[in-house]
Image: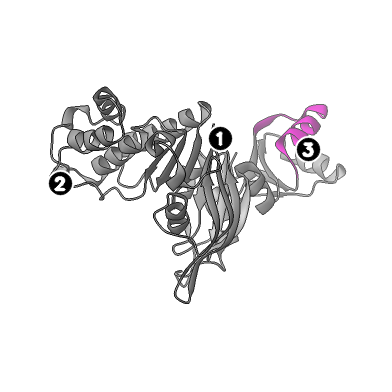
Amino acid sequence: MTRIDVHELTKEYGSTRAVDRLTFSVLPGRVTGFLGPNGAGKSTTMRLVLGLDRPTGGTATVGGKSYAALHNPLNRVGALLDAHAAHGSRTARNHLLAHATSNGIAAARVDAVLEEAGLGQVARKRIKTFSLGMRQRLGIAAALLGDPEVVMLDEPSNGLDPEGIVWIRELMKRLAREGRTVLISSHLMNETSSFADHLVVLGRGRLLIDMTTREFLDSRSRPRVRMRTTESSRLRDMLSRKGHPSAQGDDGSWTVDGAKAAEIGVLAASEGIPLLELIDEQMTLEQAYLDLTRDETEFAAATASPMSRQEV
């Protein structure tokens, strides 16, 4: 399958450097979340990969070639950058049929992707009557039209209802399981954590993070365990003897910083201490992302609410 390679990619608009010597790769077989604050350069980078803008320096290639040099590009790369780009006076089917005809794709494929996107019943309705969520589904259907090896979607969950969010999440996972290269730009951190295997995070046009989601979360937070027991005194004394200072919360639960549930569970079992609850806690992706990009955000509120931790 095909990969995306970005090397020393730079884009300047006058005195503004929107993309600053970016180097990273998007590999097949996994979903890569493409994150960053507004103005970080995500959309510009995607446009450069797709040949919609010309770089000031560096390269962006798909399968080792620039997008412009690809043979039958719709069969190699499927992309959604703007759900409003479709002509409103066309029907959904005619919109996709125009793309299919110009790229040598059979009309049967148009009907197949409309059904897959949940638009089969409205295929002959004009796009201007569509809601944002329906336009989003149409844009995703267009991205899938050529059965591409690479799929690039900018904010694909935008406007989707809960059923649509579940659908796009499972679609991205399936595409990755099939060995395709999947790059998803999103501002929805909790949603991204449900599908992204790998993260590429930008800040002010520069690369901040290029690692697996698990590595990123582990790098931003210290382990912590929460537990409940019917024998609090014995649990506290045992943890103290084993070098694990603990604290009891107002709700009666106990927490130990710097430990894993598996380790504490073994210790409790060896002492015969019953545990009613034993949970590893870790930062959510949203918390870790905000912590990472705090100084990279161009537009930020004056205050932020306290962050809580997520059970894992």
What's the amino acid at mark 2? Answer: Lys
- Outermost residue, bottom side: 15
Kindly indicate whether the residue at mark 3 contacts the one at mark 2 (C-beta within 8 angstroms). Answer: no
* Residue that numbered label 3 is attached to: 234
Towards the viewer: 59 or 135:
59
Q: Is residue 73 visible?
A: yes
* Residue that numbered label 1 is attached to: 28
- Element assignment for label 3: helix
Residue at 50%, 50% (x, y): give it: 34
- Residues packed near mark 3 inside 10 Å, few (<14), some (14 to 19) or many (20 plus): some
Indicate whether 201 appears above or below 183: below
Residue 117: percent from left, percent from top? 30, 31
| Magenta stretch, residue numbers | 259-277
Q: Which mark lies nearer to you, 2 or 1?
A: 1
Residue 290: percent from left, percent from top? 54, 59
* Residue that numbered label 2 is attached to: 128
Towards the viewer: 256 or 136:
136
Residue 257: percent from left, percent from top? 73, 49
Question: CA separation, marks 3 and 1?
Answer: 51 Å
- Element assignment for label 1: loop
Q: Please indicate whether residue 299 sits to the left or right of residue 230 in the image.
A: left
